[in-house]
Image (tube, helix red, strand yellow):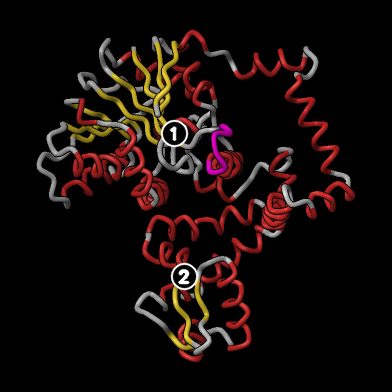
Amino acid sequence: MTASFPASRSNGHEAEAVEADARPPGWRTRMKAWRAALVARPGFRRLAQRLPGSKTYSRARETELFGIVTGFVQSQILFAALQSGLLDALTAGPVGTSELSARTGLPPDRLRRLLQGAQSIGLIGLGRDGYVTLDDHGSVIAADGGLRAMIHHHALLYRDLADPLALFDGSRSETEMRRLWSYAGSGRESAVQPGDAAAYSALMAASQSMLSDEILDAYDFGRHHSLIDIGGGEGAFLSAVAARFPGLRLSLFDLPPVAARAREKFSTQALGDCPRCHAGSFFDDPLPRGHDCVTLVRVLFDHEDSAVLRLLHNVRSAMEPGQTLVIAEPMAGDRSRGQRYATAYFGTYVLAMGSGRCRAPEEIGALARQAGFARFEVTHCRSPLMATIVVAFP
């Protein structure tokens, strides 16, 4: 589904917040506050759990709340199931618990606890015959390298969230995530070292496959002749584009050590026309011209508004009327439960990283307007967990 907006209709996020503080709450806000006060009463909750028309909904909300309260335990069970080798041990088929104990190195009684936890969140199935198999969630994770890399990577984020209030109130400035993504928002992006580039480029590439499919299913790049991916990393997205649209002329632009890794990756792939790899800073250096489509995939939400505006100005300077900018990344909003989950996750992630935030599509449109774009459209992917697309036109 696509929605089109003239860019001039969008307002600044900060201005809207100031205006909201200056006026009384609207009727929808007051209704939500009334509902919250009602739900807070134990007697009302007991009544809602008994009435035929509300008990199913009430119990579902109760279960959802318990999942939120205990969610940190579930994520750690997932991490342990992957880190211990439990999921890998089950990829070839059912395995007995004694054999699993030997393969994972976990004592039988401890393994039993992990199996119970993993079964409760849909990772494995524990049969009455004593054999263990992968369940739906476990089979997806075992087969998807991007998800596996993401879960392993979360070891850093877990440590940053050990004291969550220190993260949110700003009293903790040094974080594991900030050390890993030390180039982001630092003003020294052009000086990133090859070792740092290798670490973050590999992680981004590993998690790109699902995102690429979502974007390519939602937006038809076949309408274009030439595409350049700005901040394209090791070229995972361009490789997916080349497979779907083999006639499209492709280019990539990223920092010198990153572009070098992309060039090396492309040389090992069976591509009809190897993408050109341009090296430089997308903040400071002129961007290559002559492409009727420019893409920014998971780039803007890593940066603060001032940096995003600077980048969009640079992109706009390299574009002509009739060309198209496609922005795809997780975006804020309440369109669905999945989008709300994505907002919570990525918003906290970039907070730990020390730079950036999730923005609503209209906020990105407002920044595009300030950078000189005339209008924008919003296209929703099947899974808002992965991305929403903003298409901007000079």
**Observer-nearest residue: 341 or 327?**
341
**Could you tell me what secondary structure mostly forms the magenta stretch?**
loop
Is residue 394 shown above or below 277? above
Q: Is residue 201 left or right of residue 240?
A: right
For the point 39% across and 55% down, the residue is 146
Is residue 26 shown above or below 384? above
x, y percentage for residue 10? 53, 13
For the point 19% across and 26% down, the residue is 226
Give me the C-alpha separation between circle 2 and circle 1. Answer: 29 Å
Give the residue at mark 2: 135
Which is nearer the N-term, disc 2 or disc 1?
2
Per the image, label 2 sits on a secondary structure element best described as: loop
For the point 66% across and 52% down, the residue is 161
Is residue 223 shown above or below 5? below
Q: Residue furthest front?
A: 52
Q: Residue furthest left?
A: 272
Residues shaded magenta? 333-338
